[in-house]
Image: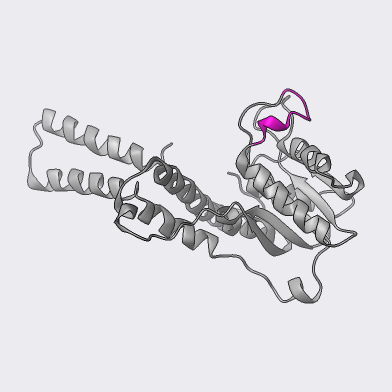
């Protein structure tokens, strides 16, 4: 919410109203409020949103070993639910982000025999069904062999995903295919590398749309949501890097 350009616009307008009520009418004050409002409106445009998304999604590293000796294990990060599931097979609760990640991983699994899928992600509320368990069951419903599936269900954010995967027994291989949203890949790769994994990026749920005409300068609801998502990833990545620098043994979302 606090990273939404709409919130910034409302704060700028509230500051203007409050300032004028308090007798602040100087040019510098008015210019500051107007600039903040203008930047907020620009951040609601498809042009701004897709510039951020393009920078995030462009990062899809594929080290040499991804071709010469590709991993047989893929880590699939959950992407959330639309509501609390009634049981561990209530697939209607899975949101579109998690579905796209799961389906990308399923295609990868089908491409070559002997591969393994490890679904990661818990729940933010105690007693609820873990996202990873629900998504793993969704994968088996679509034909994945249950013997090829493992679940990490204790993590609540990307950093915990990586470190809980490291602690799994039997141990996971250190080189894995990483399946997550393309926009989320920078933060996910950083977290996995900090935990000691080497990754091959397999992006899903691509969101970038090239600007083709002047309509890209017109604010839209979709652009507001996309900007908020992209800013969340950027701020999260900065926070992870700062926290890892301050306390190398751990970080949190």
Q: Residue at x 14, y 48 (%)?
A: 31
Residue 229: where, in percent of width, then height? 49, 46
Residue 24: where, in percent of width, then height? 10, 36
Q: Quadrant of residue 73?
A: bottom right
Q: Please tell me how many numbered marks the rendered image carries.
A: 0
Coloring basis for residues: one colour
Residue 166: where, in percent of width, then height? 78, 53
Q: Is residue 166 left or right of residue 46?
A: right
Q: Is residue 238 left or right of residue 60?
A: left
- Residue segment shown in magenta: 86-94
Q: Residue at x 55, y 57 (%)?
A: 241
Q: Nearer the viewer, residue 143 or 146?
A: 143
Q: Is residue 195 visible?
A: no
Q: Residue at x 48, y 62 (%)?
A: 55
Q: Quadrant of residue 125?
A: top right
Q: Is residue 128 visible?
A: yes
Residue 154: where, in percent of width, then height? 74, 38
* The stretch drawn in magenta includes residue 90: yes
Q: Residue at x 61, y 48 (%)?
A: 251
Q: Nearer the viewer, residue 227 or 187?
A: 227
The quadrant the C terminus occupies is: top right
* The stretch drawn in magenta includes residue 51: no
Q: Is residue 104 left or right of residue 216?
A: right
């Amino acid at each position: 919410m606090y990273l939404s350009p709409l919130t910034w616009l409302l704060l700028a307008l509230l500051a203007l109203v409050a300032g004028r009520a308090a007798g602040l009418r100087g040019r510098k004050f008015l210019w500051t409020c107007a600039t903040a409002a203008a930047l907020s409106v620009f951040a609601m445009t498809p042009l701004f949103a897709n510039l951020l998304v393009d920078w995030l999604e462009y990062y899809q590293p594929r080290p040499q070993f991804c071709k010469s000796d590709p991993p047989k294990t893929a880590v699939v990060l959950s992407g959330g639910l639309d509501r609390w599931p009634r049981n561990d097979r209530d697939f209607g609760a899975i949101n579109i982000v998690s579905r796209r990640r799961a389906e990308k991983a399923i295609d990868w699994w089908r491409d070559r025999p002997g591969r393994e899928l490890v679904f990661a992600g818990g729940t933010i509320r105690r007693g609820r069904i873990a996202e990873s368990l629900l998504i793993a069951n969704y994968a088996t419903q679509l034909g994945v062999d249950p013997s090829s599936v493992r679940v990490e269900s204790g993590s609540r954010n990307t950093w915990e995903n990586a470190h809980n995967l490291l602690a799994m027994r039997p141990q996971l291989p250190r080189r894995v295919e990483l399946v997550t949203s393309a926009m989320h890949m920078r933060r996910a790769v950083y977290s996995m590398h900090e935990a000691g994994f080497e990754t091959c990026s397999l992006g899903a749920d691509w969101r970038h749309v090239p600007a083709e005409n002047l309509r890209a300068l017109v604010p839209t609801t979709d652009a507001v949501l996309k900007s908020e998502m992209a800013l969340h990833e950027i701020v999260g990545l900065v926070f992870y890097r700062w926290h890892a620098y301050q306390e190398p043994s751990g970080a949190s979302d």
